[in-house]
Structures are given as structure tokens and as C-alpha cells.
Amino acid sequence: MELSADARSILGLALPTDPRWVDLAAISLEEILTDHAFCEQKAAITCISIIQRYATHEKLVQILAPIVTEEWGHFRLVLAEIKKRGLKLGKQRKDQYVNALLGFQQKGGDPEGRMLDQLLTMALIEARSCERFKNLSEGLSDPALRKFYRRFMESEAGHYTVFIELAETYIDKKRVRKRWQEWLQFEKQIMKTIEVRGDRIH
């Protein structure tokens, strides 16, 4: 899908990841790969949920359907990497970061606002994942893992712009831009308060 200049111009995280995170992740490889696997799984499930909720929105369904397949494929790729390295898939953990984002979503009010927040939540998760994968692709000492995460970084970069564009398709662009800035500032505060841990993607 062709990305508009408007969609590109409003992207950008307000606070970068703490540089210590990559070093911590490098010594918690089994845990970070486990968490990554479940992040990909949850992304696929969430896209399915959005499709079900907005099944009459034809463009949304057409765009998100292949992303479901892609995210599930990513889950399988991470599982394969875990197996290749002789590691084990651990248990899924509670995602403090995502739960905090969900708490910021509009719960009542107009349906358009609820839809906007659901799409922007996904955009933000994908944006932060993209940034984390970039850090791993540049900061890990293992060349194979750097290449592995470069691939994921490029995929997530495309995904978060898709969610912004979908929001702009169904909702006034000025409203999308304003709310996106509010989300970026909220996420910045989350990143300031959450402990820096190497056993999780977010």
C-alpha cells in the first residue's frame, strides 16, 4: 500500500529505548525469544479481533487479513529459531507495557473514537517493536541474530504505518494526528516508569 506523506510525518516515538536494554537482552536470549514469539502470536490474534469487530469495513479487512498470516508466520520463525539454538519456549507472561496502553484506550463515547484508539494502540506497539528490533539488529554480537532481527525490523516498520493509514481512511486526519500525539506522550511516560528488563520485547 502506498503510504501518504501525512501518515509518515506523524510517526516517531517520543522516547528511545534505554541503551542498556540490548545488553540485557543478549544475556537473556531464551527469555527474549520466548517473549518475542508470544508478541507475534498476540499480534495475529489482535488483528483477527479487529477484523471481526469491523467486518463491514472492507479496506480494513483486506489489509489486515494478510498481516494475520504474516504475524503467525513470524511466530513460527521465532519458534524455529528457539529450536535451532537448542532453547525452549517458556511461558507467556503478563505484558505490563501493553496492559498500560490498553488502559489508555477510550472505553465509552463515540464508536469512531474507540476504533481510533484500537488502531493507534496497534500502531504504537508495532512502532516500539520496530525500534527494539532495530536495536537488536545493531547491538547484538551474534551476526545471525542481527540478520534475524533486521528482517523483523523491516516488517514492523511497514505494519505501524498501515495502522496509521487505516485510521486516516475512516477518521478525520486532524483527529488522528492529534490523538496520535497524545498516545506518543502517554507511551513516553510508560517507558519512563517501566523497569528496563532484557527478558521482554516491551
Image: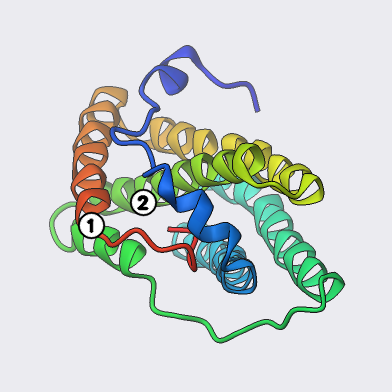
Q: Which mark is residue 105?
A: 1
Locate the N terminus by quadrant: top right
Evaluate if marks 1 and 2 touch, with contact meaning CB atoms under 8 Å apart. yes
Return the disc, 1 or 2, that comes first in the chain's sequence: 1
Name the element at disc 2.
helix
Q: Residue 164 placed where, x, y %?
A: 43, 35
Q: Residue 96 placed where, x, y %?
A: 32, 69
Query: Which residue is painted at 86% across and 71% down in the image?
Result: 84
For residue 59, say whether it is visible.
Answer: no
**Along the viewing direction, whichever of 114 and 3 lies nearer the viewer:** 3
| Disc 1 residue crowd, few under 14, some 14–19, many 20+, Cα 10 Å | some
- Where 187 sits versus 100, above or below? above
- Where 125 sits versus 27, above or below? above
For residue 75, say whether it is visible.
Answer: yes
- Where 165 sits versus 135, above or below? above
Residue 90 falls left or right of residue 49: right
Q: Residue 20 placed where, x, y %?
A: 42, 48
**Along the viewing direction, whichever of 80 and 11 lies nearer the viewer:** 80
Q: Which mark is residue 121?
A: 2
The answer for how far apart the CA atoms under marks 1 and 2 are is 8 Å
